[in-house]
C-alpha cells in the first residue's frame, strides 16, 4: 500500500504559492452571514469586515536568480493577515456589543515554518493556529492560482 505524504497532516506542500504579482497589500472585504460561534450569538448578521491582507515573496533573497522577486511566487504573511483580520473583527464586534475582545499583543510566524502561527493576547490568553493540510495549484505561466 502506498501512502501519499499529502494525506498525512503536516507533510503536504510547505505553503500555498501565489503568482508573484500578489506581492504587496490587498484590501479585503469579508461578510459573516452565518455562524454557530458563541461569539456571534445574539448579534444580527450579516457583519461586514474590511481589512488588509499582505503577500510577501517566498524565499526572495535565497532564490537562484539573485532575489529577483518577479520570478518568485508569493505567500500569505499569516501574522500580518491574522492581526489585520482580528483587528477588523474586534472593531466590528466591539461596536455591536457591550463586550470587547482582547487585543493581540504578539504574533509569531515565519515563512520558514508557515504552518504554525502563535498569538498572545492582552488578557494573557494565547492561541496557536496550525495548518495540517492545504491544497493549491498555480498555472505554469503564473497567471492563475487555484
Image (cartoon, rainbow, N blue to C red):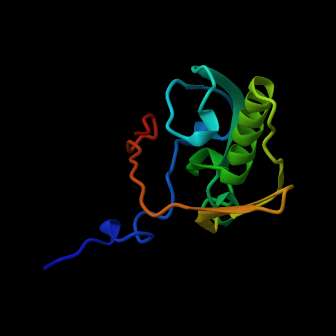
Seen at 63% across and 25% down, the residue is: 43
Q: Is residue 120 above or below residue 139?
A: below
- Side (left or right) of 79 relative to 106: left
The quadrant in which residue 101 appears is top right
User: Looking at the picture, how far across and down is residue 18, in whole percent?
Assistant: 52, 44
Question: Looking at the image, is 106 positioned above or below residue 145?
Answer: below
In the rendered view of the protein, which quadrant contains the N terminus? Answer: bottom left
Does residue 25 appear in this view?
no
Residue 145 lies, in percent from the top left, at 44, 39
Residue 70 horizontal/vertical position (percent): 62, 44
Q: Position of residue 75 (x, y in %)?
A: 59, 50
Is 102 located above or below residue 88 in the figure?
Answer: below
**In the rendered image, which quarter is residue 125 located in?**
bottom right
Answer above or below: position of 32 versus 8.
Answer: above
As drawn, which residue projects farthest toward the left? 1
Residue lying at 52% horizontally and 41% vertically, measured from the top left? 19
Which residue is more in the foreground, 118 or 40? Answer: 40
Quadrant holding the C terminus: top left
Q: What residue is shown at x 35% (from left), y 71% (from top)?
A: 8
Q: Please say whether residue 135 is visible from this viewpoint.
A: yes
Q: Residue at x 63, y 68 (%)?
A: 112
In the rendered picture of this protein, how many numbered marks are placed on residues? Answer: 0
Amino acid at each position: 500500500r502506498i501512502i501519499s505524504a499529502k494525506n498525512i497532516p503536516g507533510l503536504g506542500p510547505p505553503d500555498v504559492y501565489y503568482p508573484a504579482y500578489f506581492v504587496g497589500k490587498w484590501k479585503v472585504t469579508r461578510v459573516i452571514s452565518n455562524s454557530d460561534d458563541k461569539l456571534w450569538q445574539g448579534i444580527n448578521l450579516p457583519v461586514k469586515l474590511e481589512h488588509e491582507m499582505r503577500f510577501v515573496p517566498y524565499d526572495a533573497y535565497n532564490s537562484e536568480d539573485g532575489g529577483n522577486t518577479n520570478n518568485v511566487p508569493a505567500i500569505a504573511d499569516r501574522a500580518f493577515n491574522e492581526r489585520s483580520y482580528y483587528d477588523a473583527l474586534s472593531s466590528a464586534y466591539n461596536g455591536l456589543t457591550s463586550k470587547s475582545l482582547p487585543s493581540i499583543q504578539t504574533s509569531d510566524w515565519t515563512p520558514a515554518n508557515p504552518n504554525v502561527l502563535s498569538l498572545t493576547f492582552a488578557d494573557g490568553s494565547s492561541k496557536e493556529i496550525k495548518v495540517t493540510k492545504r491544497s493549491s495549484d498555480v498555472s505554469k505561466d503564473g497567471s492563475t492560482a487555484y
